[in-house]
Structure formats: C-alpha cells, structure tokens
Image (spheres, rainbow, N blue to C red):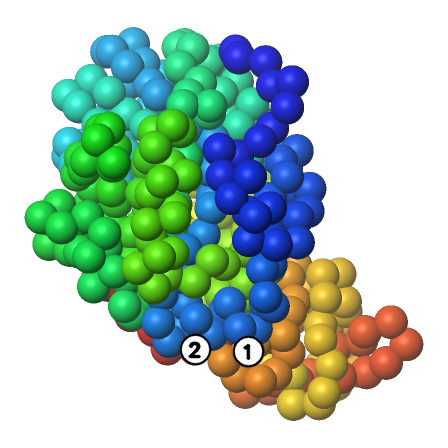
Amino acid sequence: MNGREERRTPLLEAHQELGAKLTEFGGWRMPLQYGGVIAEHNAVRNSVGIFDVSHLGKLRVVGDEGGEALQRAVTADVQALEVGAARYALVLTHKGGTIDDVFVYRIGDQEWLVVPNAANNDAVFQAISSAGHDPIDEWADWAILAIQGPDSFDLFDRVFPGSGATGLKLHRWKTVDVMGEDGIVARTGYTGERGFELYAPANSAPQAFKALLDAGGAPVGLGARDTLRLEMGFALYGHELTTEINPLEAGLGWAVAWDAPFRGKDALEAVRSEGPERKLFGVVCSDKGVPRQDHAVAHEGREIGRLTSGNFSPTLGAGIGLALGPTSATPSAGAEVVVTARNRSIAAAIVKPPFIKKGSGG
C-alpha cells in the first residue's frame, strides 16, 4: 500500500487563500469553516455549496478475483451492480460490527471504485485484501468536490456545459471532462440536497474548484457538513457506526444484500433473527442548549440511551441529536425526554429521523 508522509488535499493552498480555518481530520488538514458554519449550512440548504472531500479514500478493485474479494468484504451485491451505478455499503467484522461505511461505484465489467472514510482507508484496504485481493490505492490521484444544494444543477451546467450530468438519476455516475482531463461525476452526496460528487484528477482540481466558486458556489467546510448530515439523520463513522455497533442497530438494514456472501453475515443474520438489542433514535431539544456525543438521555427519570452525535440545527434553530439505547426501553416518537449536558438538563422530545424533510438528494 502507498505510504502517506503527508496528507494534503490538492486544494489546501486554495483553502488557505480563502482564509479557511483548518483542522486535523483523519490525519488530513481540512477546512473546518470559511466564514461561519451557520452561513455555510444555509448556503447548501438554500442555494449551492462546494465541499472539498478529497480526504476520502479511493480504492480501485479490478478483475474476477478482485470482484469476488470485494463481494466478501462489503454488504452490497457488487456483482449485480450495473456499470454506471453506485451503492452504499458496509464493511463488517466477523462479529457483525462495522469497520466502515463506503460507497461502491461499478466502473467497468470487472472494475469497481470503493470510497471509504479517510481514517478507515487502510482498514478497508485490509478488509478487501484479506478477502483475497489487494486493491489499488489511488488516494493521491483524485480530488473529490461535493456540489450540493437546490441550485447545484444550474451551477454544474454553467461550469461544465454539455456534460449530461443533470440527467443522471440518484446514485448513478458518468465520465466528464474536468478542465481537459477525464473525471467522474456522480449523483451522490451527504447533505440530503440534490447535487453531485465530482472526482477530479488532482492536477485539474484547483482549477475546477475555482471555476465552481467563481460561478456562484459557496465554499463549505467540515463543520457545516456535519450539521447538514445530522439534520438528515445520516450515520457518521465513529459515532453511529463503530466495530461495536452493527448495521441493524444503526437502522441500516436496507444497505445489506442478504443473499450476498459478505464477512459477518452469520453474526448479522443472528441479530436479524432475534432483533437488535439496541436502536438509534433522534431527539430535538425544546430548551436552549446543544446536545453532544455521550450526553445521557432520560425518560421519566430513567436513562434510555446516550447520544452518538449532537449539534445545533441551523434549519430548526434547536439542538438535535442521535442516540443509541436499548430497543425495549425506547419510547415512541413524541415522548418527552431530558438530555443531561454536563450539569445541566435540557428538555427534549424523541423524533424519528430525518429531523427535516428533504428529497434525500433526488
């Protein structure tokens, strides 16, 4: 596997020129925010924002042997996936816990692109390798720009006229010319808004990023990416997904192809048969206050779970969170609960995510 002496997105200098506040994330220096999280969040909900998500992994899997190994490593039926399609999937331990959540793109008859979370690239590489095939690590070859928001189609057409990208259905992709080089554009994202993820060759990415901003896109950092995904109830690895949390507890049974021979299948089938012992649920605060990870949630004086994620929702103007607790102890939606934030209690109510109604990127 390729070594990583320094983890730098190809757009780092552009972020510095824009005055971004940088942070370490998964071993990378990434923009946390530019002008403010709430303004950037609202730009995505109301217009269009541009994210640099180049820190995500890029693993190419090729050949019959590679396809068989990938099939054993992820919960999606990658052999049934059509060329030109993408699928969300999980990578599991033998015990059914979650190593990572990934997107899998079928690039050719015997070729797939797997996109892990930045911090888990090596773990996903090892999961595929141990299933019988070493993928090709292309982390340095590509930048990824997420173009998200209700105006994303108009913006993409202005910057890449004639690309045909706006005709793509959700979770489909096609090749596209990116400033004279071959790239990929996919109808995928992590915000709940319509939009794209553009896989741009590293050399042409700065020019593409500038063109998207010059055409009216707002630069958006990781801070708003988190508030946007949380409003949609989307899982974040290390929070709603870990090696100690299985997909059924996280409400991700829809991402499992039960006929596929994936690692951890026997353990997960046992959970499905008996029913998951824990489940995720949402809370919306009625008091002022921002819930955070590991804050306790109580109902009628009894703890019923702990937050896996929590933040302020700019759209709702309230604190929101996802919590994990025993299935048998979770009240129905609408039940009044209390979130304990340090030494303070915040009144809240249980809701079924998503917290806001969007078209899920359609």
The numbered disc on residue 46 is none
Relative vertical location of residue 229 with respect to residue 131 in this rendering, above or below: below
Q: Tell me which residue sits at (47%, 44%) in the image.
A: 53
Residue under the image location 50 percent in, 80 percent down: 315
CA gap, disc 2 and disc 1: 11 Å
Hey, what amino acid is under mark 2?
Answer: Ile
Observer-nearest residue: 8 or 135? 8
Q: Which percent across, then down, holds residue 161?
A: 13, 50
Residue in the image at 66% along x and 33% along y: 27
Left or right, residue 289 beside residue 216: right
Most distant residue in the right direction:
343
**Left or right of residue 279, residue 265 in this image:** left
How far from the left and from the top, in percent, is residue 228? Answer: 49, 65
Residue drawn at 34 percent across, 64 percent down: 216
Horizontal relation, residue 98 to residue 348: left or right: left
Query: Is 116 situated above or below 261?
Result: below
Residue 74 lies in quadrant: top left
Structural crowding at the residue carrying mark 1, measured as other residues with C-alpha within 10 Å and reported as few (<14), some (14–19) or many (≥20): some
Mark 2 element type? loop
Residue 255: horizontal and vertical position, in percent? Answer: 36, 46
Q: Amino acid at mark 1?
A: Pro
Which residue is under mark 1?
314
In this view, the residue in front, 181 or 37, is: 181
Q: For the residue labelled by badge 1, is the local secondary structure a helix, a strand or a loop?
A: loop
The residue that disc 2 covers is 356
* Quadrant housing residue 260: top left
Q: Earlier in the sequence, mark 2 or mark 1?
A: 1
Image x and y of residue 52, in percent: 47, 46
Number of other residues with Cα within 10 Å of mark 2, as a class: few under 14, some 14 to 19, many 20 or more: some
